[in-house]
Image (cartoon, rainbow, N blue to C red):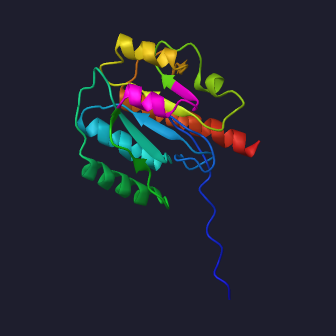
């Protein structure tokens, strides 16, 4: 008998991120996404890698920012965390974890992407920023020390939308999980409508 057809690609989904079938990143529910991360202290950063993987993110882009608390990343350790989390969550693929780059480099390589920064100064919700498009989005979460004035200027100049996650100031890892959950929920609702 002929071999069975290959399995379908994972459904696109979102988080910090990008939402488009076949794109380099996916949350695993309704679209593909890019997860952009800043650098946070030890165990908290590990938690972001673990939970983002469990929630279906297809790729993680650590950023080197002006006020990062941690400036190095042990890629071998990160890959072990991602593999373990993917297995625990029953994922059939592992998210790609990219080498850290600075904000300017990342923005220049994502010029044509829909980008949303989750920041306390944001005036819109993630739902408002996504609108009806819900195809591709890059979510950005800031470092523990916040973004520098120069970085905020760069993000505004790059036409990044600023979304607010609510009235409370959240730790970076809480912001990441909340934003991924929100995007997944919005994408899932879009998928089933």
Kindly identify the residue that appears in the image at 32 percent across and 25 percent down.
65
Kindly identify the residue that appears in the image at 52 percent across and 19 percent down.
164
Q: Is residue 82 magenta?
A: no
Quadrant the C terminus occupies: top right
**165 sits to left or right of 190:** left
Q: Quadrant of residue 47?
A: top left
> How many numbered marks appear?
0
Q: Nearer the viewer, residue 85 or 14?
A: 14
Kindly identify the residue that appears in the image at 64 percent across and 28 percent down.
130
Residue 73 location in percent, x, y?
25, 41
**45 sits to left or right of 27:** left
Give the magenta-colored segment's residue range.
Answer: 102-116
**53 sits to left or right of 161:** left
Residue 8 location in percent, x, y?
64, 62
Residue 129 location in percent, x, y?
62, 24
Q: Nearer the viewer, residue 87 or 24?
A: 24
Q: Is residue 113 magenta?
A: yes
Kindly identify the residue that appears in the image at 44 percent across and 55 percent down.
94
Name the residue furthest bottom.
Answer: 1
Quadrant the N terminus occupies: bottom right
Q: Nearer the viewer, residue 140 or 184?
A: 140
Vertically, is 4 above or below 108?
A: below
Residue 48 location in percent, x, y?
37, 39
Q: Quadrant of residue 20?
A: top right
């Amino acid at each position: 008998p002929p071999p069975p057809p290959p399995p379908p690609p994972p459904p696109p989904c979102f988080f910090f991120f990008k939402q488009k079938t076949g794109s380099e990143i996916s949350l695993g529910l309704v679209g593909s996404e890019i997860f952009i991360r800043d650098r946070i202290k030890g165990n908290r950063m590990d938690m972001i890698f673990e939970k983002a993987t469990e929630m279906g993110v297809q790729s993680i882009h650590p950023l080197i920012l002006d006020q990062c608390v941690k400036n190095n990343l042990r890629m071998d350790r990160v890959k072990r965390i991602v593999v373990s989390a993917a297995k625990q969550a029953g994922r059939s693929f592992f998210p790609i974890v990219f080498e850290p780059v600075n904000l300017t480099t990342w923005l220049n390589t994502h010029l044509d992407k829909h980008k949303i920064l989750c920041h306390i100064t944001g005036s819109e919700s993630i739902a408002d920023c996504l609108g009806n498009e819900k195809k591709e989005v890059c979510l950005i979460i800031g470092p523990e020390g916040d973004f520098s004035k120069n970085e905020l200027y760069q993000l505004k100049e790059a036409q990044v939308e600023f979304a607010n996650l609510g009235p409370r100031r959240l730790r970076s890892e809480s912001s990441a999980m909340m934003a991924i959950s929100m995007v997944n929920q919005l994408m899932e609702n879009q998928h089933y409508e």
